[in-house]
Amino acid sequence: MQVDFYLSAASRYSYLASTQLDKISAQTGCEFLWKPLNNHALLSANGMDPFRSPAPVSGQYDWAYREYDAKCWAEYYDVPFVEPVNFRKDPPFIVRGCYAAESLGRIVPFCRRLSAAIFVEGRVIDQPLLSDFAEDVGIDRSDFEHAFGSEQVAGREKEVLDEALSKNVFGVPTFVSGDKLFWGNDRIPLLLRALEG
């Protein structure tokens, strides 16, 4: 079984969900295909970006609540979490770095390293730092930087965004298994039930 895992390495709920995937794979035998997106590009393409409103459109988008909620989930999962520093929107270079790593066969370790830097180490992320993370996961720095600027990687970003939109993905994290779609870290029990069903 393969499950498409649409995520943003800059999303707290994608990070939290990602900490559970190895356990789910071991339990069900499924394979997760990591497909990073720029969440704001996805939301804008769907015509509904709740983060662009001057005031929260509902309580769930209030930043203080999101921090509290993420900390509750991290405690439940027994994983570390720190509130990101100056980081409330995905810079476009984040998803580009993920697909540069994918082109070099290291997308999962790279996404995990990037998320850990944001949500465990509390680091401020800039584009040059991505090359350091690439080296951390065994990618040659010059190969990564070449891939980062390539048309192939830019095309891959658009391809995955278009694919997500065609499957009615409207936010991250989203899991797609066959014709079933599960949005949100809190839908993992429903995903697990479907995989075991």
Image (cartoon, rainbow, N blue to C red):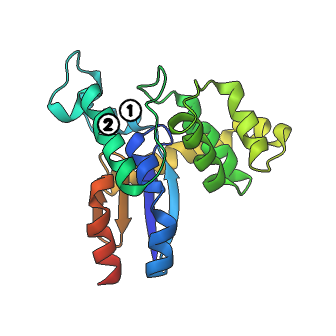
Identify the residue at image location x=49%, y=81%.
29
Q: How many marks?
A: 2
Identify the residue at image location x=47%, y=64%.
21
Q: Amino acid at mark 1?
A: His
Residue 149, can we see it?
Answer: no
Identify the residue at image location x=23%, y=27%.
62
Q: Point out residue 51 in the picture as x, y percentages from the top left corner.
A: 29, 26
Depicted 180 relative to depicted 76: above or below: below
Give the side of residue 30 with respect to residue 65, left or right.
right
Mark number displayed over residue 56: none
Identify the residue at image location x=29%, y=35%.
68
Q: Amino acid at mark 2?
A: Leu
In-front residue for pair 164/89: 89
Residue 83, can we see it?
Answer: yes
Image quadrant assignment for residue 121: top right
In-front residue for pair 112/71: 71
Q: Label 1: state its secondary structure.
A: helix
To which residue does mark 2 refer?
A: 43
Q: Are marks 2 and 1 in contact (CB under 8 Å)?
A: yes
Mark number displayed over residue 40: 1
In-front residue for pair 125/153: 125
Depicted 194 relative to depicted 92: above or below: below
